[in-house]
Amino acid sequence: MKNPKLVHRVSNPEKTNVRPWNSVCASCDRVHSLKGWHKPAPGELNHSQITHDICPDCIRQLYPSYAHIADQLVTQASAHDRRRYL
């Protein structure tokens, strides 16, 4: 049986803050959603598939020599697809 909430999220991603696959920063545990990187609200990740990533802030802090890459991702995201990188 299909989960109606999941079907709604997959077919209408612009109508929800949470995507079916959510990136979680491996360092600070912030979640990447349509609103950008933020601390997850209680229950926000229920029934979501989780994958790990590193948020731009942690790239800057943990890998200072790669900070320019984080800056490029943020710049590209604002110019193209804000939902993917922020």
Image (cartoon, helix red, strand yellow):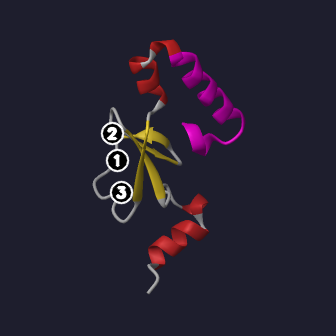
Of helix, strand and loop, which one carries label 3? loop
- Residue at mark 2: 29
Marks 2 and 3, the one that precedes in the sequence: 2
What residue lies at 60% left-to-right and 66% top-to-bottom? 12
In three-dimensional space, the C-alpha distance between marks 2 and 3, rounded to whole angstroms, equals 12 Å
Q: Which residues are magenta?
A: 66-86
Answer above or below: position of 8 versus 30.
below
Do callouts 3 and 1 mark residues in contact (Cβ within 8 Å)? yes
Residue type for callout 3: Leu
| Residue 8 in magenta stretch | no
Drawn side of residue 75 relative to residue 16, left or right: right
Residue type for callout 2: Asp
In three-dimensional space, the C-alpha distance between marks 1 and 2, rounded to whole angstroms, equals 8 Å
- Residue at mark 1: 40
Q: Mark 3: few, some, or many residues within 10 Å (few <14, many ≥20)?
A: some
Of labels 1 and 2, the one closer to you = 2
What residue lies at 68% left-to-right and 31% top-to-bottom? 76
Answer above or below: position of 66 versus 7.
above
Marks 1 and 2, the one that precedes in the sequence: 2
**What is the x, y in percent for residue 84?**
59, 43
**Disc on res. 14:** none
Taking depth in this image into account, of 20 and 35 the one nearest to the observer is: 20
| Residue 81 in magenta stretch | yes
Of helix, strand and loop, which one carries label 2? loop
Instruction: Determine which quarter of the picture holds residue 1.
Output: bottom left
- Residue at mark 3: 45
**What is the x, y in percent for residue 36?**
50, 40
**What is the x, y in percent for residue 9?**
52, 67
